Amino acid sequence: MGRATVRREPSAGLFAGLSVGHARLLVVSANESPAGQQPTATSAAVKNDSVRDSAFLKACRREPVPHTPVWFMRQAGRSLPEYRKVREGIPMLESCTRPELVTEITLQPVRRHNVDAAIYFSDIVVPLKAIGVDLDIKPGVGPVVEKPIRTRADLAQLRDLTPEDVPYITEAVGLLTRELGATPLIGFAGAPFTLASYLVEGGPSRTYENAKAIMYGDPQLWADLLDRLADITAAFLKVQIEAGASAVQLFDSWAGALAPVDYRRSVLPASEKVFKAVEGYGVPRIHFGVGTGELLTPMSEAGVDVMGVDWRVPLDEAARRVGPGKALQGNLDPTVLFASTEAVESKTREVLDSAKGLEGHIFNLGHGVMPNTPPDALTRLVEYVHTNTAR
């Protein structure tokens, strides 16, 4: 009933003794321009006709698709036993700097689930770590910053990011685009507000009291902080695009803590700057936040091609808030995957029905895959969407 699927396996020897020099040669052959040049009309990956004609990129462009494409946020991660095996004993931030390991982890859900796109395995704080910010990802806690930014003098921690700061990104993306073939690769970064929240609070927060204190009490310092983070984020995305990423997603995970008026005044300009900086590459730009139903209108005005929607707002209502000219991505509640197969299919049908009539739709969860999600539930979900949306 569903489409024919092709399970992609990595090339023999890719993860066995591949030298750094060999990896760099692969990267050069896979890309048409080195990092650091001005944007071209399209990235190297999008110039590949098989990638350009993929269901995922067609949906991003709001073109007819053979089936609704599917991928999942956090599809490469703790829900997969093969991920836990290869990550065993390796700290998170270190794992993000090993190109062969990043490649293997990124490919795992493509092989297992037959998703329509891969998302680059990394973390939103990687660019901050790369420019020398003293931080670490603590198990069970999340990113923890040794010296939070609270004053203007603290901004000195945030220098410009260059491609030389993240050579492992260029190497890994080059390896991935070679292995993925016709499957698109999504690059990503954390949005300025979410990064600022971690930097100011010193770690995860439920109230964002320190960040909001600066936003309300010293709006110029806040604006300067977000502007600097916008430059760092844009540079990080450019490295991924120039290495071969076919699309990019900006995660503003914590923007849902803001009122619309505060988002427009204090956050939107920085996110808009990021999207503007990568506009010339011609790759789809996706925006996503959690609990951002009231922000869908201003977030979609940042310069996006695809708007991600969490599970709290039906897609047809989200389309009304976003307006015409943009595809939507989402939005099954991640916890549904712990229910029976019948319940998953029923809730998935609700999402697909809500998406009827959209200009473009990419099926995803309303947030990331939860760590204890049964992997087989994700595999079945992909097949169900493919089968039931086949044109």
Image (cartoon, rainbow, N blue to C red):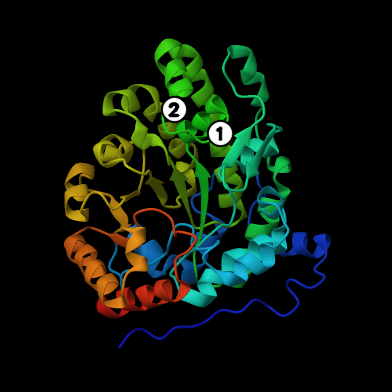
Q: Is residue 177 visible?
A: no
In this picture, residue 3 sits left or right of residue 18: left
In the rendered image, the vertical position of residue 359 relative to residue 227, given as above or below: below
Q: Amino acid at mark 1?
A: Gly
User: Dividing the image into 4 quarters, which one contains the C terminus?
Assistant: bottom left
- Would you identify the image quadrant in which residue 335 lies? bottom left
Circle 2: is it few (<14), some (14-19), or many (20+) Cα within 10 Å?
some
On screen, residue 63 above or below 12 = above
Q: Earlier in the sequence, mark 1 or mark 2?
A: 1
Vertical comparison of 219 with 310: above or below: above
Q: Give the labeled residue for mark 1.
A: 203
Circle 2 residue: 208
Which x, y percent locates residue 251? 45, 44
* Circles 1 and 2 in contact, beta carbons < 8 Å: no
* 108, 374: nearer the viewer: 374
Q: Which residue occupies the foreground of this view, 343 or 117?
A: 343
- Identify residue type, mark 2: Tyr
Q: Residue furthest toward the bottom?
A: 1
Name the residue at 49% across, 37% down: 277
Q: Quadrant of residue 389?
A: bottom left
Secondary structure found at label 1: loop
The structure residue drawn at horizontal position 27% and vertical position 68%, both measured from the top left corner, is: 64
On the picture, is 41 further left or further right than 35?
left
Q: Determine whether, in the image, residue 207 is placed left or right of residue 89.
A: left
